[in-house]
Image: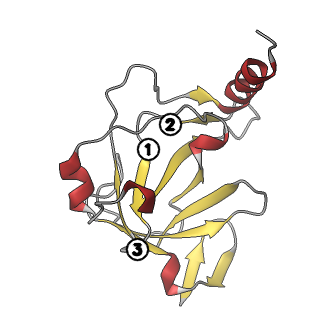
Amino acid sequence: MKVATKAYGVIDVDECQEITFSQGLLGFAAYKQYVLLDAERQPFYWLQSLEVERIAFMVINPFLFRPDYEVNIDNEELLEIGLSDPSKALILSILTIPPEGGLMTANLQGPLVINRDTRFGIQAVLSDLRWKIKHDVMAELRAWRERIESPC
């Protein structure tokens, strides 16, 4: 299918890349259909709205910079997207990248949880106080490396 994207203009996208968020995303409840696209640079992806070309989110797998990340959400929310096996979940965090070159941050309080089989997703809201809406991705990665490289 042809998709008008914010990052790449009009491109061909396989239908298996389509994801439905029946509740929409926080602040974007009216927009429910998206596609997940590889970004030019890994490990990043674009979550592109199919309804409005200018709505696109840069996302990342949060376990890449926080291997200790835990997504504890209600079973009801998982059932909403038909997810009974947690290994079938794709977890992504929305990034904020200021245009003027400030800190890149990730929202770990509101992860995207996507059922890989059905391609239905939700944006969860975690109550765990460790996870904030603005985690400095590079600082988190440095801190994690220091912890695993420390001899003590």
Q: Residue furthest bottom?
A: 1
Task: Tell me residue 143's x, y (percent).
Answer: 72, 20
| Mark sitting on residue 33 | none
> Spatial distance from mark 3 to mark 1, Cα to Cα?
18 Å
76 left or right, relative to 32: left
Whether the residues at callouts 2 and 1 have beta carbons within 8 Å, the answer is yes
Disc 3 to disc 2, C-alpha distance: 24 Å
Q: Earlier in the sequence, mark 3 or mark 2?
A: 2
Q: Quadrant of the C terminus?
A: top right
The residue indicated by pointer 2 is 107
The image quadrant of residue 85 is bottom left
Residue furthest to the left in view is 76
Give the quadrant of residue 119.
bottom left
Residue 141 x/y as whole percent: 72, 30
> Which of the 4 quarters of the picture holds residue 22?
bottom left
Q: Secondary structure at mark 2?
A: loop
Task: Find numbered disc 1 in the image and state the secondary structure of the residue it sits on.
Answer: loop
Whether 149 is drawn above or below 13: the answer is: above
Calculate the distance from the C-alpha at mark 2 to the C-alpha at mark 1. Answer: 7 Å
Q: Secondary structure at mark 3?
A: loop
Q: Callout 2, which amino acid?
A: Asn
Q: Amino acid at mark 3?
A: Asp
**Residue at (50%, 60%) from the top-left corner?**
55
Reading the image, the residue beneath label 3 is 117
Residue type of the residue flagged with mark 1 = Pro
Q: Earlier in the sequence, mark 3 or mark 1?
A: 1
Residue at horizontal 23 percent and vertical 51 percent from the top: 77
